[in-house]
Amino acid sequence: AFNITTNSGTDVELSSMTLTIAATNDNSSAAVFTYIESVEIFNETNNTVYDFSYASGTSTKLYSNTSMDLILEDGETNRLVVRADVKSTATNQDYTFSIANAASHLTMKEVGDDTAVTDITPNSVTLKKVTVENSSVTFSTNALSATYNAVVGAEDIKILSFNLKASE
């Protein structure tokens, strides 16, 4: 997730955005990734979802939305969360999402006079790496310390003790 705030003295329209996605252990020759799909940005500020689609690239891929039409009110901070669905076949992948070059990967203009916003700071943002791993759970029973006898209909009788351990 990252925050975006405009300080231009007027409202700004964010009309397009391109995300750079670098992956480890995902298909680098295909147009789209093999193990993730439905790349999107969720705006926590106004509860809006913006879908992104594959634009270009092989090992590092660009996903974009060219019709966001997000109005950023001057001085207001919008929190944007990058999300993607992980397919059930995913096992051991890493993904790093970024805006590699704000000047070319963000299209912003001032509302009212359509002046392009070009002084974007910082020029790039790299989000934390997302790691996909196989999941597992281990179930083990614990021996009860004493033999229990119970009457049908009795309450609060301990009949089983167990442990669950999830993989990391």
Image (spheres, grey):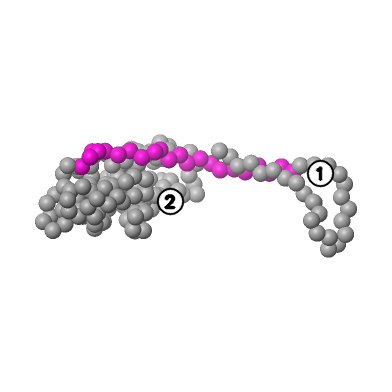
In percent of width and height, residue 101 lies at 23, 39
Label 2 environment density (alpha carbons within 10 Å; few <14, some 14–19, many ≥20) = few
Q: Which amino acid does label 2 sit on?
A: Asp
Could you tell me if residue 58 is visible in this image?
no
71 or 138: nearer the viewer: 71
* Cα distance in 3D space between marks 2 and 1: 43 Å
| Magenta residues (range) | 120-141
Residue drawn at x 33%, y 58% is 46
Q: Looking at the picture, does residue 84 appear above or below residue 152? A: above
| Residue of label 2 | 85
Magenta stretch holds residue 152: no
Instruction: Look at the image and tell me in which quarter the N terminus lies.
Output: top left
Quadrant position of residue 48:
bottom left
In percent of width and height, residue 58 lies at 31, 40
The numbered mark, 2 or 1, whose residue comes first in the sequence reads: 2
Residue drawn at x 56%, y 38% is 168
| Residue of label 1 | 144
Could you tell me if residue 96 is visible in this image?
yes
In the picture, measured across the screen, residue 118 lies left or right of residue 72, that is left
In percent of width and height, residue 3 lies at 32, 46
Q: Mark 1 falls on what kind of element?
A: loop
